[in-house]
């Protein structure tokens, strides 16, 4: 893997989305529009090593989804459908008619749900270890449906090693600076009620709710946009078999499995990821 110099965070911008103060980054002034969607309880810092590279050829937007990062966390269910509607509001607020959606984990599920609801607003899809393709998900995610567990969550640096082990195949692939950028966002207080609502609306102790993923599975054959499916072969959060579910259902897809890789290929193998996505968008 090539060495990466230290990066500078893009400037935070804010826009009101249906009255909700929403943080976003924007880079690039030409080419097609891309929207980057992080996973549940994530933030735009997850895309730190992708946005500038993609912005050399495209207009790229990344935003903290409702209830995440530095965006407001209002009352709501935080269901995939509610988050897809929020994405529609974000696009409308910034005057984006259509875009390519690049979504990881829950952000992938939101991308699929949005495409199901608003097919004419999606140019292409990039699904990265995406939720919404089956029931299976890690025990740690299923446990956030339990109020007693969520009430014990007190973000601290002691949690970082366990989180890195569960999310990455080899956390040494991560620049140490990334943890320093991400940790203050992760540690913002007051999120437990959001985490619990997000958990209960999307999961049970048995896995992803059938009413969340089944409408997506039923609609895959109607999603005709060119779709790039990227998955870490060693993902401990959402199993790689869901990549093959997506490939079997989507009629116009490419599939790329990253070996020795966990839940975030765009962080573990950012050069390969950026190159693959740019080539897909150029084809």
Image: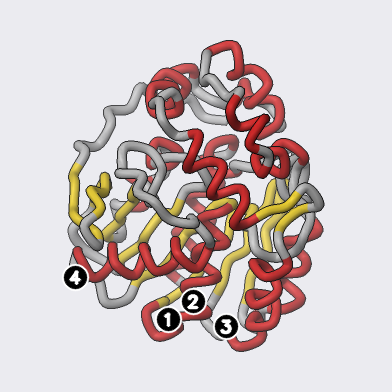
Whether the residues at callouts 1 and 3 have beta carbons within 8 Å, the answer is no
User: Which one is earlier in the sequence, the residue at label 1 or at label 3?
Assistant: 1
Residue that label 4 marks: 95
Measure how far apart labels 2 and 3 are at the Cα level.
7 Å
- Residue 229 relative to residue 155: left or right: right
Q: Circle 3 — which element?
A: loop
Q: Which mark is residue 223?
A: 3
User: Which one is earlier in the sequence, the residue at label 4 or at label 3?
Assistant: 4
Rendered view: 112 above or below 121: above
Q: Circle 2 — which element?
A: helix
Q: Horizontal and vertical percent for residue 168? A: 66, 32
Q: Horizontal and vertical percent for residue 282? A: 42, 69
Q: Which mark is residue 118?
A: 1
The N terminus - image quarter: top right
- Taking the spot 53% from the left edge, 41% from the top edge, the residue there is 195
Whether the residues at callouts 2 and 3 have beta carbons within 8 Å, the answer is yes
Q: Horizontal and vertical percent for residue 183? A: 44, 22
- Residue 249 relative to residue 79: left or right: right
Q: Which mark is residue 115?
A: 2
- On the question of residue 268 being in view, the answer is yes
Q: Residues within 10 Å of mark 2 (few under 14, many from 20)?
A: many
Mark 1, mark 3: which one is toward the viewer? 1
Whether the residues at callouts 2 and 1 have beta carbons within 8 Å, the answer is yes
């Amino acid at each position: 893997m090539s060495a990466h110099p230290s990066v500078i965070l893009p400037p935070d911008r804010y826009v009101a989305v249906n009255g909700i103060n929403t943080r976003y980054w924007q880079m690039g002034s030409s080419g097609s529009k891309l929207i980057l969607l992080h996973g549940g309880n994530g933030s735009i810092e997850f895309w730190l090593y992708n946005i500038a590279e993609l912005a050399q050829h495209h207009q790229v937007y990344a935003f903290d989804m409702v209830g995440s990062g530095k965006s407001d966390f209002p009352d709501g269910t935080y269901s995939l459908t509610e988050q897809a509607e929020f994405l529609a509001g974000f696009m409308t607020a910034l005057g984006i008619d259509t875009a390519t959606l690049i979504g990881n984990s829950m952000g992938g599920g939101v991308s699929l749900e949005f495409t199901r609801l608003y097919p004419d607003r999606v140019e292409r899809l990039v699904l990265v270890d995406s939720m919404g393709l089956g029931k299976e998900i890690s025990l740690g995610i299923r446990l956030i449906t339990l109020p007693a567990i969520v009430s014990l969550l007190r973000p601290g640096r002691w949690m970082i090693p366990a989180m890195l082990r569960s999310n990455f195949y080899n956390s040494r692939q991560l620049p140490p600076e990334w943890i320093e950028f991400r940790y203050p966002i992760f540690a913002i207080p007051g999120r437990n009620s959001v985490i619990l609502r997000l958990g209960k609306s999307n999961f049970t102790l048995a896995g992803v709710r059938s009413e969340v993923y089944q409408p997506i599975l039923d609609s895959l054959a109607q999603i005709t946009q060119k779709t790039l499916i990227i998955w870490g072969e060693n993902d401990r959060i959402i199993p790689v078999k869901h990549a093959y579910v997506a490939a079997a259902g989507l009629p116009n897809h490419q599939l790329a499995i990253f070996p020795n890789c966990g839940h975030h290929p765009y962080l573990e193998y950012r050069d390969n990821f950026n190159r693959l996505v740019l080539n897909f968008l150029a084809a």
